[in-house]
């Protein structure tokens, strides 16, 4: 698509015919793209983020955003394509230094220290906030700026944007509406008082502050975005910082306090959450109104920690009840934080960060996303049961992935995440789980050793998508135990409730291997989705064999299946072969799927693990 540049001063502006913009790829680097209405039903100065480019090509998907727009829209590139002011990902050289370690646990331990904000970075951000307070002091009385988000909750990477919230001493009931909108000159000359400005609503406050920042020599690229919580985005050359400024954003302070508290309760939470966020950025799953937010990813990690056995982190309701620090969003009160932490006991779960990282990806690959994730109570709930709750708020909007805000129960954190992004999320989970199962993952010196194999580049994702759709053959090495072949059949037929048909296994003396089992398997239910959650109910029953427990889990999932008709989901052939080499017996299971399916990843994990327990 050819871009016509209207002017070369930041922010760069490009003009498109709206119908041509939909689904196009734009050859622009490292930019945020916003659309502004040039006529139609949108309000003046109304901007909507349509995406952020971190790679060589950027696809804009407007979808329903074109409703009410007339002939043209304008796109703003908040950072110019040659700008080096911001980085969406830490430098590749920093990551490369981590990947030189030959022990995965060392890679994980070093990841945070190499990529996190340094003390110097934090001091610079604090100095910027003090400087900005001084700028606003001329126009707004009795206000304070608070850093929140990744800059202070331990999740920040070098070069990340700075989130800042401006609070005043006036409540919503004390807000004022003026007949004539004030200008900075009105305040400077005394026609409008600083207290009056402090009483403006968030919408009008951000509009006023934009006029202040527009005229400041050290501030550029100022964009105001209207929404549930209006924000100002701008760049400060003095401190080399990209800033997102909001007003009266108390919930963000509370969210930040929660993440800080969770990281202090168990440092493994921060370790896993940082890696997951970096992974998601690599995959193109975050940064954009149609994608996952960093906070949503943190809540996914939190739910995973809550679902471990035993749990690693408690429900948010319990934390908020016991912790005044979290309840009030008192992110600067370190003494209160220390006192509240004493009210909680360490988890009895001793799994390493390396084990938990692997489990995280498999947990969500097999997660039943027909359930709503509820961090407030530390569980997930089927949509039907969620809606049947007495306190269910009908303004709650469901989505392909639904994560309830632990503080605003009427809010779905992932409501804006579009279906293609959710679908890509599942696909990237599958690729990552396959990377964990690869022999290269645990082979030091390999190009794909450890963390290097899970940080997926967009070009690799596109390539692997085509390969996965064509890959139907899979081989699993399993423990060579007595009657292994018959036990594999039991696992598939009894443990997972697959419909299995047996075939004769005529031994071929000319072959290097002996076929012990031949099956054709079919399944009509996503029996592999949500097994972790159901297993918690089954686990309390005593004297169950491992296979009996898996059978009961499958029956529970089947009973709750909402499939109204018998529809084939997956079909595959299974062969169990035995071979002898150098007097060592080797047993392998070969799966040949009629159509490529993520079930293969589950079976590669499930069959060997269950066999070892039998």
Image (tube, rainbow, N blue to C red):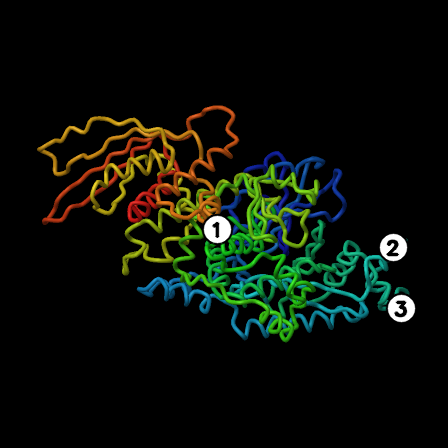
Q: Residue at x 68, y 55 (%)?
A: 223
Q: Position of residue 482 (x, y in %)?
A: 20, 43
Callout 3–callout 2 Cβ contact below 8 Å: no
**Residue that numbered label 1 is attached to:** 55
Q: Residue at x 41, y 67 (%)?
A: 110
**Mark 1 vs mark 2, CA separation in Å:** 44 Å
**Mark 3 vs mark 2, CA separation in Å:** 18 Å
Q: Residue at x 27, y 60 (%)?
A: 445
Q: Residue at x 35, y 51 (%)?
A: 436
Mark 3 or mark 2: which is in front? 2
**Residue that numbered label 3 is attached to:** 190
Query: Quadrant of residue 95 in the image?
Result: bottom left
- Pick whichever, 547 or 519, lies toward us: 547
**Residue that numbered label 2 is attached to:** 177
Callout 1–callout 2 Cβ contact below 8 Å: no
**Mark 3 vs mark 1, CA separation in Å:** 49 Å
- Pick whichever, 33 or 354, lies toward us: 354
Residue 565 relative to residue 577: left or right: right
Callout 3–callout 1 Cβ contact below 8 Å: no
Q: Secondary structure at mark 2?
A: loop
- Please state the total of marks drawn on the protein image: 3
Q: Earlier in the sequence, mark 3 or mark 2?
A: 2
- Pick whichever, 16 or 250, lies toward us: 250
Q: Position of residue 103 (x, y in %)?
A: 32, 64
- Pick whichever, 112 or 520, lies toward us: 520
Q: Residues within 10 Å of mark 3 (few under 14, many from 20)?
A: few
186 shown above or below 300: below
């Amino acid at each position: 698509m050819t871009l016509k540049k209207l002017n070369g001063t930041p922010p760069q502006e490009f003009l498109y015919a709206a119908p041509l913009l939909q689904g196009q790829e734009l050859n622009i680097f490292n930019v945020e793209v916003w659309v502004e209405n040039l006529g139609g039903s949108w309000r003046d100065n109304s901007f909507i983020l349509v995406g952020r480019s971190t790679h060589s090509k950027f696809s804009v998907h407007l979808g329903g955003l074109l409703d009410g727009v007339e002939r043209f829209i304008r796109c703003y590139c908040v950072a110019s394509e040659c700008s080096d002011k911001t980085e969406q990902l830490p430098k590749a050289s920093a990551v490369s230094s981590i990947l030189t370690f030959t022990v995965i646990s060392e890679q994980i331990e070093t990841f945070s220290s190499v990529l996190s904000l340094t003390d110097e970075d934090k001091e610079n951000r604090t100095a910027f906030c003090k400087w900005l307070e001084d700028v606003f002091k001329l126009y707004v009385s009795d206000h304070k700026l608070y850093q929140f988000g990744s800059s202070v909750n331990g999740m920040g990477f070098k070069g990340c944007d700075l989130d800042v919230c401006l609070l005043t001493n006036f409540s919503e009931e004390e807000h004022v509406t003026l007949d004539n909108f004030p200008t900075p000159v009105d305040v400077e000359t005394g026609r409008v008082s600083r207290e009056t400005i402090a009483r403006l609503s968030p919408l009008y406050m951000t509009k006023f502050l934009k006029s202040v920042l527009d005229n400041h020599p050290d501030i550029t690229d100022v964009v105001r975005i209207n929404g549930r919580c209006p924000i100002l985005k701008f760049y400060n050359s003095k401190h080399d910082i990209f800033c997102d400024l909001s007003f009266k954003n108390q919930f963000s302070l509370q969210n930040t306090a929660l993440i800080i508290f969770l990281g202090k309760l168990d440092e493994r939470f921060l370790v896993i959450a940082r890696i997951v966020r970096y992974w998601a950025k690599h995959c193109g799953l975050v940064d954009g109104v149609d994608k996952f937010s960093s906070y949503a990813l943190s809540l996914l990690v939190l739910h995973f920690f809550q679902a471990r056995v035993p749990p690693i982190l408690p429900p948010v309701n319990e934390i908020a009840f016991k912790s005044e620090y979290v309840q009030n969003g008192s992110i600067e009160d370190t003494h209160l934080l220390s006192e509240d932490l004493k009210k909680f006991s360490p988890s009895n779960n001793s799994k390493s960060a390396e084990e938990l990282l692997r489990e995280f990806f498999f947990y969500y690959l097999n997660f039943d996303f027909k359930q709503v994730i509820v961090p407030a109570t530390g569980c997930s709930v089927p949509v039907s049961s969620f809606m049947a709750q007495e306190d269910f708020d009908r303004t709650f909007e469901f989505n392909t992935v639904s994560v309830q805000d632990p503080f605003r129960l009427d809010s779905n954190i992932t409501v804006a995440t579009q279906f293609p992004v959710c679908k890509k999320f599942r696909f990237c989970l599958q690729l990552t789980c396959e990377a964990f199962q690869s022999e290269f993952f645990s082979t030091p010196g390999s190009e794909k050793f450890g963390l290097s194999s899970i940080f997926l580049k967009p070009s690799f994702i596109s390539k692997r998508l085509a390969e996965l759709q064509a890959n139907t053959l899979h081989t699993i090495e399993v423990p060579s135990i007595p009657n292994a072949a018959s036990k594999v059949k039991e696992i598939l037929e009894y443990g997972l409730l697959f419909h299995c048909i047996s075939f004769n296994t005529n031994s071929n003396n000319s072959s290097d291997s002996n076929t012990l089992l031949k099956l054709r398997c079919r399944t009509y239910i996503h029996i592999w989705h949500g097994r972790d959650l159901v297993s918690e109910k089954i686990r309390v029953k005593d004297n169950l064999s491992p296979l009996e427990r898996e059978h009961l889990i499958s029956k529970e999932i089947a009973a709750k299946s909402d499939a109204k008709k018998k529809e084939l989901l997956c079909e595959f052939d299974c062969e169990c072969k035995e071979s002898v080499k150098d007097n060592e017996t080797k047993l392998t299971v070969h799966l040949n799927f009629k159509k490529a399916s993520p079930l293969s990843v589950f079976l590669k994990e499930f069959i060997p693990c269950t066999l070892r327990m039998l």
